Image (cartoon, helix red, strand yellow):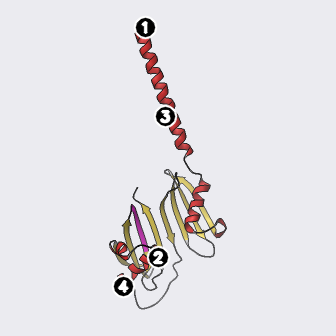
Amino acid sequence: MTTNKTLRKVFVVTMALVMVMAMSVSAFADSKISMKKAFSIALENAKLTSDEVRRVEKEWDDGAYSIEFTKKGSRTEYEYEISASGKILEKSVDYNRAKVYGKKKLTKSEAIAKVAKFSGFKKSVVKNGYIDLEKEDGEWVYEITFERKGYEYNYDVHARTGKILEYSKESFN
């Protein structure tokens, strides 16, 4: 009789644990945003509407939404990775890389100033990163990388025009 009471208690506790786990899983599943919401977050961040984009690609991959699109009337490409909760984990923007010919290159300090102005960060934040001048597709480009509050920022700056060609923001988490 004592064994039966013990087995009943174990059964009741086990069932209670199973119910709590099932409710937790259900609550987590309900907290996942939809693909439509993830796309809306990306568009809002890019300051665009769905009518202003073309070639949209969306997929669910490794627990996050991957969303890519191109702005109509330009070759600007946007790529986002958005978590199930709606947090932007990664963002990359690739602007049209039209060839520009000229003789004078920006200095590193001038490239840092361009990134600081574009990103809204202080020059000291950008300056503490990594800066490299490389030739890409026949054009000189400053590659500037720095970290800020759990994110890594990467910028490509045209060394002759100062135009931001591409940038990305990636979470460490």
- Residue marked by disc 2: 118
Quarter of the image for the N terminus: give it. top left
Instruction: State the residue in front, 91 or 128.
Output: 128
Q: Which residue is mark 4?
A: 107
Q: Are marks 4 and 1 in contact (CB under 8 Å)?
A: no
Quarter holding the C terminus is: bottom left
Please name which of the two marks, 4 or 2, marks the residue nearer to the observer: 2
The number of numbered discs placed on residues in the rendered structure image is 4
| Residue wearing tag 1 | 1
**Hey, which residue is sitting farthest right in the picture?**
51
Residue at numbered disc 3: 21
Q: Earlier in the sequence, mark 2 or mark 1?
A: 1
- Mark 1–mark 3 Cα distance, whole angstroms, equals 30 Å
Give the label, 3 or 4, closer to the camera.
3
Please say whether residue 66 is one of the residues in the magenta stretch.
Answer: no
Rendered view: 172 above or below 6: below
Number of other residues with Cα within 10 Å of mark 3, as a class: few under 14, some 14 to 19, many 20 or more: few
Give, as a single range, the part of the protein colored magenta.
149-155
* Disc 3 secondary structure class: helix
- Residue 88 image point, x, y percent: 50, 59
Q: In terms of sequence position, does the residue under pointer 3 or pointer 4 come before the other?
A: 3
Judging from the image, what secondary structure is the residue with disc 4 in? loop
Q: Amino acid at mark 1?
A: Met
**Mark 4: few/some/many CA within 10 Å (<14, 14-19, 20+):** some
Residue 109 is marked as: none
Query: Judging from the image, what secondary structure is the residue with disc 2 in?
Result: helix
- Separation of residues labelled 4 and 2 (CA atoms): 17 Å
Is 27 displayed left or right of 1 in the figure?
Answer: right
Residue reaching furthest to the left: 128
The residue that appears at 45% across and 24% down in the rendered structure is 13
Q: Earlier in the sequence, mark 1 or mark 3?
A: 1
Going by the numbered disc 4, the residue's amino acid type is Thr
